[in-house]
Amino acid sequence: MEGSEMIKPDLHKSETGVEYITVGDIRDLQQTDRTYLFHCTHARVALQFLTDSLFRFKLSRGKHALDLTHSRVIELAARDLQAEVAVSETEQAYELRTAALVVTVNKSPFALRVTDLHGNLISEDEANGYGWTKEHTIFTTKKAQDENFYGFGEKTGHLNKKGSLQSMWNTDIYAPHVPEIVELYQSIPFFISTKGTNVYGLFLDNPGKTEFDMTDTKRYKITCHSGELEYYFLSGASMKEIVSQYTFLTGRMPIPPKWAIGYHQSRYSYETDLEVRELAANFRAKEIPCDVIYLDIHYMDEYRVFTWHPTRFPQPDKLLADLRADGFRVVPIVDPGVKKDPKYLIYREGVTHEHFCKYLEGETYTGEVWPGVSAFPDFTNTQTQQWWGAKHEGFIKSGIEGIWNDMNEPAIFNETKTMDVNVMHGNDGDPKTHGELHNHYGLLMSKATYEGLKEQMDGKRPFVLTRAGYSGIQKYAAVWTGDNRSFWEHLQMSIPMILNMGLSGVAFAGADVGGFAHHSNGELLARWTQAGAFLPYFRNHSATRIARQEPWSYGETYEAVIKKYIEMRYVFLPHLYTLFREASVSGLPLVRPLVFEYPQDPKTHNLSDQFLLGDSILIAPITQPDIDYRAVYLPAGTWIDYHTGEVVEGGRAVVADAPLDVLPMYVKAGAIFATGNVVQHSGVQQDITFQVYAGNGSYEFYEDDAVTFAYENGAYNLLRLEQRVEGSTLTLSWTEAHSGYDSADQLTFTVHHEDGRTETHTVAKADGQLVLNR
């Protein structure tokens, strides 16, 4: 006998396929204040022009009113902007014209066409490209055969993401990290498109699961698994302009404390007080510079966050004080999982004050992580953020100035690797499911951590490192690329990953030097250290039960090379610090793919194994074993080998000699940058020398106290330098653009001439000019 279950609707297979509903035709346009609201057959669409070259698009299905409240990641300064727009109408379309763009809105069917004021096409939607199925909202736009795509945050594969599929869903991926893995720890749904001289960016502001399908040769498709379709379209003359606009929209990083850009040493785990002290003593005895030592989960009492193990770390305050006296900061790990234990104060408070994530019916969500069954703070609520931030008080009183947030995708030991998507988040009174807000979790945990530290650190700058994040993470934390492997392939892969992070607004990024898992070796560690020394975040980190990889782990030959390049990190620290300040002001990355500075050179469009530090120092790491030379592509211009002083004309590839102790580096003629003497940690005052490579160029050098926020009130110096070549004369001039910090009244210049000569001059800062014969 059969029951009614035999005719359940899901047993019926549609013969017409999945229904796809489009926006349809425009019925009318309503302008309210700064919003252009298009009433369409099946949807409502709003356009808002924040600037002449940046507009917001939001779609609501059916006749529902559009909620035009900006998401939490959009900067306050951007939310109320309004560009002047001239609107005209024809029988076929509406035309919205700003001082930079013309957006033509086709009436039947609804579609956008974006051009510049001269009619040059920037972007054009597919006919019926906006629509949805029951599960997904879909947006399809035409693309050109020669269109290239960059950004997308933390993604494997080569630099140029043309022809790829990218999925945004923060995921704990221990293994494997290979190009076909489309989801890692960070989700930044932003890309930059270049085609010829046209450049634009698109930021899809949706913290649920989204997909970017760039595989079709004629179009790309964006799919949202939840929420409404909302994006920001950014247009500009260069990739620099797009990155600057995007970081204006989602925020720019504060200047980190200088100690945070030195060398960091970590392991899963340094398990005892004695082991940490021995590690620190070895660094100082061997005179290998180091600023930071990390403590992974074993420092805790049964992995309870905000605790110390009573026997492994019996006197944490004394340990931290002793290390600080020797120039070390300590950064402990803090995960979001709070052990379910009624005797544990953090858990008890979280339950009592309703700080934990819950199901709709009121049951606290629990999942298993390092402490066992655990609850998870609901960081979508401001009160919970404040509670969590305040819990760092004990660490701060002990001398901690930085925190490492891990497992905050959030990672759960289950089949999905994360929290149940049906968990409800309070979201400050606008409840949404975890599926809708998943990619915000790591961002908001980092925000809670950063703001909690800042509030309690008496004017000092905090440092936060995070594994998971979303657009805007740059305001709160540095990012590392997670659980990589000690493989040469992972060294290769880390370079375009970090470069695309920079193009996605995250200037402070790096990968675990030497590889986290698997066994490293001396050559790999040496070559990875060479690359890491010139990337923004510089940490050696390795896993438990694998070969150790401290700088001295593989014998004297490799130790000498590793020490040399850690020392070079400190030589370049004044320049790196200046570049971090630039990132805080402009949003531009410290390390840049060559296409960023040389977009018209097609050879740079997918160059993934070399990069620029700033705009004029080219770094070409060795990323294969047993190699003592490599091809290096030099763009047009005159370049100087950093090590030998040899002058090379660019616009071609050259073969660089690279024995184990040499990292190929080239400096462009006209460059000026600051260097310092070797110090054992960033707290030691450095003597600054300006390296001047003869030519035409300029430089801004920045300095402040390196540890506080006093720079926000003008306590900093900004020195502008310029060099000009005329015939046989090189004129070097400088002016103090801002003077608010006490520093040396003399300047030292080392001038590198094209004939290989170098000369050093120390002059009074007040002189303002130095004239030399070439």
Image (cartoon, helix red, strand yellow):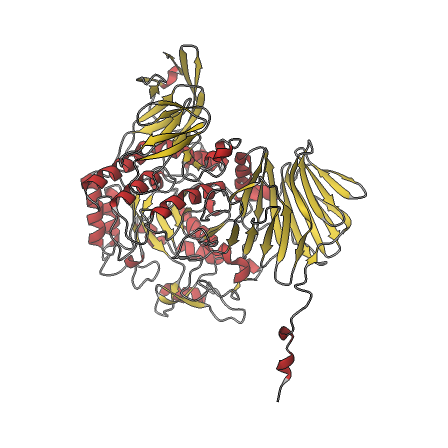
Quadrant (top left/top right/bottom left/bottom right) for the C terminus: top left
Residue that appears at 61% across and 41% down: 144
Quadrant (top left/top right/bottom left/bottom right) for the N terminus: bottom right
**Image location of residue 512, percent across then percent down:** 34, 47
Q: Does residue 607 appear in this view?
A: yes
**Closest to the observer, 139 or 434:** 139
State whether residue 608 is above or below residue 43.
above
Residue that appears at 51% across and 68% down: 359
Q: Is residue 579 left or right of residue 245?
A: left
**Image location of residue 667, percent across then percent down:** 38, 27
Q: Is residue 652 left or right of residue 49?
A: left
**Image location of residue 324, percent across then percent down:** 26, 44
The residue at the far right in this view is: 91
Rendering quarter of residue 325: top left
Residue that appears at 34% across and 46% down: 488
Q: How many marks?
A: 0
**Closest to the observer, 136 or 51:** 136
Q: Does residue 381 appear in this view?
A: no
The residue at the far bottom in this view is: 1
**Image location of residue 278, percent across then percent down:** 19, 49
State whether residue 658 is above or below residue 182.
above
Q: Is residue 141 left or right of residue 243?
A: right
**Closest to the observer, 406 or 147:** 147
Q: Is residue 545 left or right of residue 588?
A: left
**Closest to the observer, 431 or 120:** 120
